[in-house]
Amino acid sequence: MKTPQRVFPGTFAVFIAFALGLTASSNCYAEKHKHINLAGGKGLPFSDGVIAGKTLYVAGQEGSDEKGKLAAGGIAAETKAALENIQKVIKAAGFEMSDIVSVTVYLADIQEFGEMNKV
């Protein structure tokens, strides 16, 4: 039994269509999303924020200073530094702090919640 000669061209056409689909998808993604990267991304493989449509998503920000070290002075200083880092991302994206609709906070020690919440 002979193998049909048209197997390779059909497979190749499917591969080309698949490759074009990937290219189109990546172009659509680039048009709909804008990445906000401060300080060159700090050498990390993710963005500080991403604008999708009219919504800004801000990545988790720690309470670190410009040098990347944890702010000295306990949870209050760390909270203040984290909020300042968030504000930098928000401003770079063209938004304001008053535009925030939801915040999630993770604490290593829940006993520090009251002091963190004051800030």
Image (cartoon, helix red, strand yellow):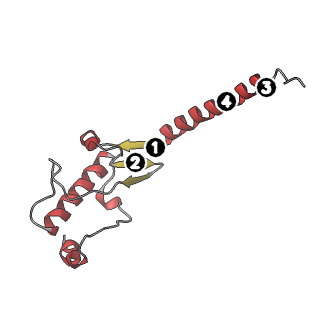
Residue 82 screen position, x and y as percent: 22, 59
Which is more foreground, mark 4 or mark 2? Answer: 4
Q: Nearer the viewer, mark 4 or mark 3?
A: 3
Q: Label 2: how many residues lie within 10 Å, few (<14), some (14-19) or many (20+)?
A: some
Q: Which residue is mark 1?
A: 33
Give the percent coordinates (x, y) of residue 10. 77, 26
Q: Earlier in the sequence, mark 3 or mark 1?
A: 3
Residue contact between numbered discs 2 and 3, judged by CB atoms under 8 Å: no
Residue linked to disc 2:
50
Residue farthest to the left, as pictured = 73
Q: Is residue 9 above or below residue 101?
A: above
**Which tag, 4 or 3, sits closer to the chain's start?**
3
What kind of element bears circle 4?
Answer: helix
Q: Amino acid at mark 4?
A: Phe
Q: Which residue is label 4 attached to?
A: 15
Q: Earlier in the sequence, mark 2 or mark 3?
A: 3
**Image disc number at residue 70:** none
Residue at image location 30% in from the left, 68% down from the top: 106
Residue visible at 48% across and 38% down? 30
Residue type for callout 3: Val
Q: Nearer the viewer, mark 4 or mark 1?
A: 4
Element under disc 1: strand
Disc 3 vs disc 1: Cβ atoms closer than 8 Å?
A: no
For the residue labelled by badge 2, is the local secondary structure a helix, a strand or a loop?
strand
Q: CA distance from mark 2 to mark 3?
A: 44 Å
Q: Residue at x 75, y 23 (%)?
A: 8
The quadrant the N terminus occupies is top right
Report crowding for label 3: few under 14, some 14 to 19, many 20 or more residues within 10 A (C-alpha): few
Mark 3 to mark 1 CA distance (whole Å): 39 Å
Label 1 sits on what residue type? Answer: His
CB-based contact (under 8 Å), mark 1 and mark 2:
yes
Which residue does the image show at 34% across and 46% down from the upper left? 93
